[in-house]
Image (spheres, rainbow, N blue to C red):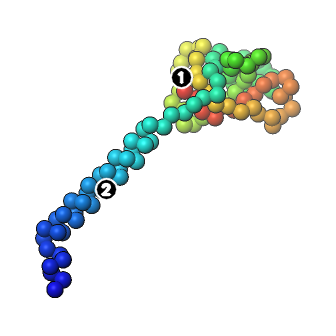
Protein backbone atom coordinates (compact mmCIF):
# COMPACT_ATOMS: atom_id res chain seq x y z
CA UNK A 1 0.00 0.00 0.00
CA UNK A 2 2.87 2.45 0.72
CA UNK A 3 4.43 1.72 -2.65
CA UNK A 4 1.91 3.91 -4.43
CA UNK A 5 3.30 6.97 -2.54
CA UNK A 6 6.97 6.21 -3.18
CA UNK A 7 7.13 5.56 -6.87
CA UNK A 8 10.40 6.33 -8.69
CA UNK A 9 8.77 9.27 -10.46
CA UNK A 10 7.62 10.93 -7.24
CA UNK A 11 10.99 10.34 -5.62
CA UNK A 12 12.73 11.95 -8.61
CA UNK A 13 10.35 14.94 -8.48
CA UNK A 14 11.03 15.37 -4.75
CA UNK A 15 14.80 15.31 -5.36
CA UNK A 16 14.51 17.89 -8.12
CA UNK A 17 12.28 20.08 -5.97
CA UNK A 18 14.77 19.91 -3.10
CA UNK A 19 17.66 20.80 -5.42
CA UNK A 20 15.73 23.75 -6.83
CA UNK A 21 14.86 25.05 -3.35
CA UNK A 22 18.48 24.67 -2.17
CA UNK A 23 19.79 26.52 -5.23
CA UNK A 24 17.26 29.34 -4.82
CA UNK A 25 18.09 29.73 -1.12
CA UNK A 26 21.84 29.94 -1.75
CA UNK A 27 21.33 32.42 -4.59
CA UNK A 28 19.08 34.68 -2.53
CA UNK A 29 21.47 34.71 0.43
CA UNK A 30 24.54 35.47 -1.69
CA UNK A 31 22.77 38.23 -3.62
CA UNK A 32 21.59 39.84 -0.39
CA UNK A 33 25.16 40.05 0.93
CA UNK A 34 26.47 41.62 -2.28
CA UNK A 35 23.89 44.41 -2.21
CA UNK A 36 24.89 45.75 1.22
CA UNK A 37 26.42 49.20 1.19
CA UNK A 38 28.03 51.20 3.95
CA UNK A 39 27.23 54.84 4.42
CA UNK A 40 30.03 56.92 5.85
CA UNK A 41 29.99 59.80 8.33
CA UNK A 42 32.73 61.93 6.75
CA UNK A 43 35.23 62.27 3.97
CA UNK A 44 38.79 62.62 5.25
CA UNK A 45 42.40 62.84 4.13
CA UNK A 46 45.27 60.97 5.73
CA UNK A 47 48.06 63.54 5.43
CA UNK A 48 50.99 61.46 6.63
CA UNK A 49 52.90 60.08 9.58
CA UNK A 50 52.95 61.92 12.89
CA UNK A 51 56.61 62.76 13.39
CA UNK A 52 56.19 64.63 16.67
CA UNK A 53 58.00 62.97 19.52
CA UNK A 54 55.51 63.20 22.35
CA UNK A 55 53.61 60.65 24.36
CA UNK A 56 50.22 61.97 23.23
CA UNK A 57 50.79 61.58 19.50
CA UNK A 58 49.27 58.80 17.43
CA UNK A 59 50.90 57.19 14.39
CA UNK A 60 49.02 59.01 11.57
CA UNK A 61 47.66 62.52 10.94
CA UNK A 62 44.18 63.00 9.50
CA UNK A 63 41.96 65.88 8.36
CA UNK A 64 38.21 65.21 8.61
CA UNK A 65 36.39 67.32 6.01
CA UNK A 66 33.44 69.39 7.18
CA UNK A 67 34.56 69.60 10.79
CA UNK A 68 36.15 72.82 12.06
CA UNK A 69 39.61 72.34 13.60
CA UNK A 70 39.64 68.80 12.31
CA UNK A 71 43.29 67.98 12.85
CA UNK A 72 43.05 64.45 14.24
CA UNK A 73 45.33 61.52 14.84
CA UNK A 74 44.83 57.77 14.78
CA UNK A 75 46.94 54.67 15.30
CA UNK A 76 45.56 52.11 12.86
CA UNK A 77 42.83 51.18 10.43
CA UNK A 78 40.29 48.48 11.21
CA UNK A 79 41.53 44.95 10.59
CA UNK A 80 38.69 44.43 8.10
CA UNK A 81 39.98 47.31 5.94
CA UNK A 82 41.30 46.58 2.45
CA UNK A 83 43.35 49.78 2.55
CA UNK A 84 47.01 49.59 3.54
CA UNK A 85 48.55 52.89 4.55
CA UNK A 86 52.21 51.89 4.51
CA UNK A 87 52.19 51.00 0.80
CA UNK A 88 50.29 54.10 -0.37
CA UNK A 89 51.66 57.60 -1.02
CA UNK A 90 50.22 60.49 1.01
CA UNK A 91 47.79 62.24 0.96
CA UNK A 92 45.15 59.48 0.93
CA UNK A 93 41.51 60.50 0.42
CA UNK A 94 39.13 58.21 2.29
CA UNK A 95 35.60 57.89 3.68
CA UNK A 96 35.33 57.00 7.36
CA UNK A 97 33.08 56.12 10.24
CA UNK A 98 34.83 57.05 13.48
CA UNK A 99 34.50 57.93 17.14
CA UNK A 100 36.59 60.05 19.48
CA UNK A 101 38.94 58.49 22.02
CA UNK A 102 38.51 59.99 25.46
CA UNK A 103 40.57 57.47 27.36
CA UNK A 104 43.62 59.62 28.06
CA UNK A 105 44.52 63.01 29.46
CA UNK A 106 45.97 64.08 26.11
CA UNK A 107 42.57 64.74 24.54
CA UNK A 108 42.80 68.48 25.19
CA UNK A 109 46.12 68.60 23.32
CA UNK A 110 45.61 65.98 20.62
CA UNK A 111 42.34 64.83 19.05
CA UNK A 112 42.75 61.08 18.82
CA UNK A 113 40.12 59.05 17.02
CA UNK A 114 39.37 55.42 16.32
CA UNK A 115 38.36 54.60 12.77
CA UNK A 116 35.51 52.08 12.78
CA UNK A 117 35.26 51.55 9.01
CA UNK A 118 37.03 53.01 5.99
CA UNK A 119 36.91 52.98 2.20
CA UNK A 120 38.59 54.92 -0.57
61 to 102, vertically: above or below: above
The reply to whether dot 2 and dot 1 touch (C-beta < 8 Å) is: no
- Rate crowding at label 2 as few (under 14), some (14 to 19) or many (20 or more) other CA atoms within 10 Å: few
Left or right: residue 1 versus residue 69 is left
Q: Can residue 49 be seen from the camera position used here?
A: no
> In this figure, which residue is indicated by the disc labeled 1?
120
**In this rendering, position of residue 40 left or right of residue 27:** right
Q: Which residue appears farthest toward the left when viewing the image?
A: 8
Q: CA distance from mark 2 to mark 1?
A: 36 Å
The secondary structure type at the circle numbered 2 is helix
SS state under label 1: loop
Residue 120 screen position, x and y as percent: 53, 23
Q: Residue at the location (76% across, 33% down)? A: 101
- What number is the disc on residue 75? none
Nearest to the observer: residue 82 or residue 64? 64
Task: Tell me: residue 50, above or below residue 25.
Answer: above
Mark 1 surroundings: few (<14), some (14-19) or many (≥20) residues within 10 A = few
Report the residue at 34% width, 46% height from top. Answer: 27
Residue at (77, 16) in percent of width and height: 68
Residue at left 16%, top 86%?
A: 1
Can the viewer see residue 3? yes
The quarter holding residue 113 reads: top right
Q: Position of residue 63 (x, y in %)?
A: 69, 17
Vertical placement of residue 70 versus 104, above or below = above
Percent x, y of residue 31: 39, 42
Mark before the other along the chain sequence, 2 or 1: 2
Q: Nearer the viewer, mark 2 or mark 1?
A: 2
Q: Where does label 2 land, which residue?
A: 22
Relative image position of residue 105 (x, y in whole percent): 86, 32
**Residue 32 sits above or below residue 106 on the image:** below
Amino acid sequence: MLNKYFTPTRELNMKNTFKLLAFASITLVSCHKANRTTSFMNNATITGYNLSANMCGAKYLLVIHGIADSGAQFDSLPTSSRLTIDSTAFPINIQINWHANHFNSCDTIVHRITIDSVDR
